[in-house]
Image: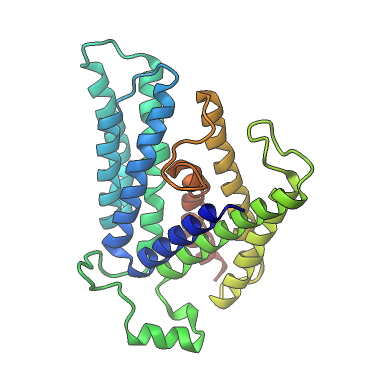
Amino acid sequence: MPWSRIISGIIAIALALTASVLGGWYFTFMFMAIVYLGQLEYFELVKAKGIAPAAKTTIVVSLALLAIATFSSTLADAVMPVAGTFICFYLLFLPKLASIADISTSILGLFYCGYLPSYWIRLRSLGNPAVSNIPFDGYLPNLDTIDLVKQGNFAALPQGLTVTLLAFFCIWAADIGAYTIGKFFGRTRLSDISPKKTVEGSVFGVTASVTVAAIGGWLLHWAGSPWTGIALGFLIGITSLLGDLTESMMKRDAGVKDSGQLIPGHGGILDRADSYVFTAPLVYYFVTLLLPLLK
């Protein structure tokens, strides 16, 4: 495994953990940066197909959507169709007649790179009474929080913090497990979409995600544990894999190997964030709709 890949991966994990612990606007700003860079890469893939999307407009409304999600998840849902309508109106009044492909890729950019990532903001906000924590107010762990961690009473920590970290750990376990096992022991190709992905690596990645989630559900005293944790881990493992394959399909269609070259050893932002795109809504509704029914 290249050292550049290891070092950049460690830095990315450290930044994600820091932003997750701080929460609030720090967490939102991190995702705004990811969404901005990811959409730049996405629209480059789209333009490689000769399509002319409303790139700048879509990026602006996507960032606005993330900011709104910090205040209210309900309002973010209401803004989504309004943002899509605004993008369509913008394309209608361009000097050049927009095509179906121009419109559809713009709306996909809003949905794939804006709306779905907003669920990470909503997830981190669960159980937090405040959204304004600049410079360090409201979300920064205090002495009581540190004592809870020392005592192992993780269930008493804010739900948004624990569930977000658990989801991250599951994704990291799935990615690292699938990459390592697939590289050294993989023999059976999983899909023609991504030739390097193997059945052996994918199975181990899902298993790693299930293991982490089962332990997390037990530590958080979830109802129905460990089965609820196992179910969530399985869903995260499968969904992160599907997110990876979806981005690979877009790259394959655009005729490129990587979405960018921003991250040494990994490629672009989309190459690293693809596993997170479809996962956040699933985790959010799992803990807000399913878990309460089991209590």
- Examine the rendered structure and indicate whether residue 139 appears above or below residue 119: below
- Examine the rendered structure and indicate whether residue 293 appears above or below residue 270: below
- Most extreme residue toward the front is 3
Counting every numbered tag in the picture gives 0
* Residue found 44% across the figure and 40% down from its top: 261
Q: Is residue 277 visible?
A: no
- Examine the rendered structure and indicate whether residue 87 appears above or below residue 2: above
Q: Position of residue 222 (x, y in %)?
A: 56, 72
* Residue found 32% across the figure and 49% down from its top: 33
Q: Quadrant of residue 196?
A: top right
* Residue found 29% across the figure and 37% down from its top: 59
* Residue found 49% across the figure and 79% down from its top: 154
From the viewer's side, name the closer residue of 86 and 16.
16
Query: In the rendered view, does 69 fall on the left or right side of 292?
Result: left
Query: In the rendered view, does 257 fall on the left or right side of 205?
Result: left
Q: Tell me how the rendering is colored.
A: rainbow
Q: Position of residue 257 (x, y in %)?
A: 54, 32
Query: In the rendered view, does 293 fall on the left or right side of 96?
Result: right
From the viewer's side, name the closer residue of 133 and 68.
133
Q: Position of residue 79 (x, y in %)?
A: 28, 41
Query: In the rendered view, does 6 fall on the left or right side of 184?
Result: left
Q: Is residue 224 visible?
A: yes
Q: Position of residue 179 (x, y in %)?
A: 64, 51
Report the quarter where the C terminus lies.
bottom right
